[in-house]
Image (cartoon, rainbow, N blue to C red):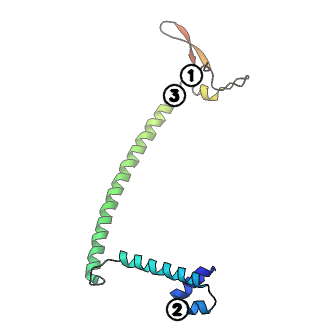
Amino acid sequence: MKTSEHVEYLLRQGKKPEELVDLGFPKSVVTRVRRRLREEKAVQQAKAPKDGGGAKSLSESSVVSVEGVAAMQQELVSLESNLRELQKRIETLETSFGDTVARLDGTPALGLRHHFKCDCGASGLVALYIRCTKCGKESWWGWSPKE
């Protein structure tokens, strides 16, 4: 345990700073830790509500608690509704995606650009010689190296 931690522990136990110095703790450490503890206490007191009457009565805290629970229940219902809506959208997307994949599976050379690797070391640089099946016009279609 560090000296400052030990001093803090003893101060919190009610030991007086003079006693700690008499026990052999450095006065500068005792002073620094004591000052920090006082500052923390002041901050805590500043944050504490100043309602003048102390704690709320049991009935007041129960009302707040019941209102808080009701608000949480409404939020939960809203979240559940949003979750159901999201699940429906996911199902629609999955169905649509499955249909799209099924249609693409029949496409010639599907994924060729991503899977093609030439003996020369080129990857994805591939083109197909294609022909329009209506008019018979032929051309190249694919990916060429950038020049």
Mark 1–mark 3 Cα distance, whole angstroms, equals 9 Å
Where disc 2 sits, the SS reads loop
Viewer-proximal residue among 7 and 86:
7
Query: Looking at the rendered structure, which numbered label has been put on residue 9?
Result: none
Which quarter of the figure has residue 76?
bottom left
Horizontal and vertical percent position of residue 84: 37, 51
Q: Distance between the residues labelled 1 and 2?
A: 87 Å
Q: Nearer the viewer, mark 1 or mark 2?
A: 2
Q: Residue 104 carries which label?
A: 3
**Closer to the camera in the image, 145 or 62:** 145
For the residues carrying marks 3 and 2, which lies nearer the camera in this image? 2
| Residue beneath disc 2 | 16
Q: Where is residue 86 in the image (x, y as percent from the top left)?
A: 39, 48
Would you call the spot at circle 3 few (<14 residues within 10 Å), some (14-19), or many (20 or more)?
few
Residue at figure coordinates x 60%, y 20% from the top left? 146
Q: Which of marks 1 and 2 is nearer the N terminus?
A: 2
Residue 44: image quadrant is: bottom left
Q: Which amino acid does label 1 sit on?
A: Pro
Residue displayed at 61% across by 93% down: 22
